[in-house]
Amino acid sequence: MKKSKIKMEFSIKKKEELKNLSYEELLEYVENLTDNIVQEKPRKHSNNSSIPPSQDPNRKKKKKKNQSLRPKSDRKPGGQPGHVGVTLRQSDQPDETVRIPFTLDRCQQCGSDLDATLAVLKEKRQVLDLDLQNIQAQIREYQSFAKVCPVCGHANHDNAFPHDVAPHISYGINLQALVSYLNVSHYLSYGRIVQLLSTLFGIHLSEGTVDNLLKRASQAAEGEIARIKERLALSKVIGIDETGCNINAERHWNWVFQNGEDTLIVVDKSRGRKVINETFDAGFVDACVVHDNYASYSGLVAQEEQLCLAHKLRDLNYAIECDDTQVMKDIKQLLKEAMNDHKETMSPAGHRFLLKQQYEATLDHLLAQPVIPGSETHKQINSFTKARNKIFTFLLHPNIPPDNNGSEQAIRNVKVKLNVSGQFKSRQGAEDYARLRSIIDTSRKRGVNEFGALVKVVKGENVF
């Protein structure tokens, strides 16, 4: 509910003074009091707006009662039925077998001689560990040869070195992939990467060398990034989101385009629609685009659109806190029921179409309810009315999510990186991170070993 407060310039009378006022004076006082009341809106936070949890006004104070959008469940904490756990199991092919000598020469029960008795296997125990003796740097030397022509004396040199072998001495594929993996996937700083390689492998790099290795890996990833972009342009569902990032104290934006199989992260100085148009010049004529209804997505070229209902639910929470109107509570309940129905298996497609019509009819009825002009409820009614055709698109297709959580999860890694490093030092560094992070996230979605994917990228091989 909105809190009421009175302007300081208005003179408040004491109870004793009110008793001495005439009817006309008392009526005038009440009118002045009404005119000077100001409705104070509740503060916005991560549960009723798009403010991230890290910027919650009461984050460092006592936490309020949980207001998560996730409904309560009857399930007990821990692994659920059907969950596949990970258990340390013995291997059928151990790398090394240690036979423990049998040292008893007489029976522990009767004292009989055991020297002539054959020992049989009683128990096996295994230890999983690292072979530190083989974790070391390796230098491979490539030698090329020449032949001098016995007739003309020309020195014939068959210069057939592999493409990744530079003159004199260079860093190998595995080392480039490892540096990329530690920096992008595990957010290690240049200094910590230098320390780790020195401690574990005896390889002494400078921070400048680490930066150069990341640039090389990023350049090698351009071909795979182009293929990811091509697949996203042809996909049936795509989620889009953006988040701010600092590059040398200057504001930029990281954009993410993703679906269930691919992720593409793009860095740009703009937050406008031109980034979408430049990245996908043909738009998404065959796809449903899921987004949070930011102004950049107006006029989007797409077959269908689905607004992120998680964002809309937070907006409804704020309107309920401000006005406490029943219509906002009813719309919130309607969205939750639609999201639950989306999880049900429905066939044929006609059932989904009919269900969507029923939900839209109920929404239309709620949007037609009278509200106070200028209130938060009125603002939300206008917002839902404008976006009416983008609210229940997900009900028609089981593979379209009702929220944009996939994009928010993909973009969250950029924030984690910034929390560790503070900012990117250059536009090039931010773009290197975006390309390599796109490879890693796509690998995870496709069940591909992400380090192995980086090795293939550095080699110049196709990964997906």
Image (spheres, rainbow, N blue to C red):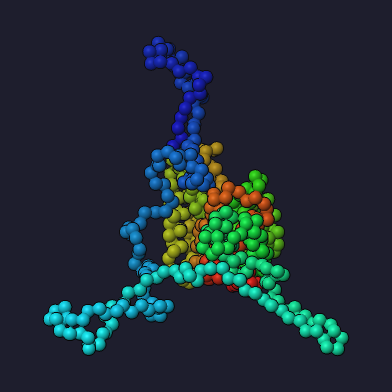
Q: Looking at the image, which residue is at 68% across and 53% down?
A: 427
Q: Is the residue 188 above or below the residue 219 in the image? A: above
Q: Looking at the image, which residue is at 46% across and 62% down?
A: 342
Q: Looking at the image, which residue is at 55% across and 43% down?
A: 379
**Residue 96 percent across, percent down from the top left:** 40, 78
Is residue 344 visible in the rendered structure shown here?
Answer: yes
Is residue 386 visible in the rendered structure shown here?
Answer: no
Quadrant housing the C terminus: bottom right
**Residue 355 percent across, percent down from the top left:** 47, 62
Which is nearer the eye, 149 or 288?
Answer: 149
**Residue 249 percent across, percent down from the top left:** 65, 45
Which is nearer the eye, 386 or 10?
Answer: 10
Image label count: 0
**Residue 232 percent across, percent down from the top left:** 62, 66
Q: Is residue 395 left or right of residue 62?
A: right
Question: Residue 113's image quarter?
Answer: bottom left
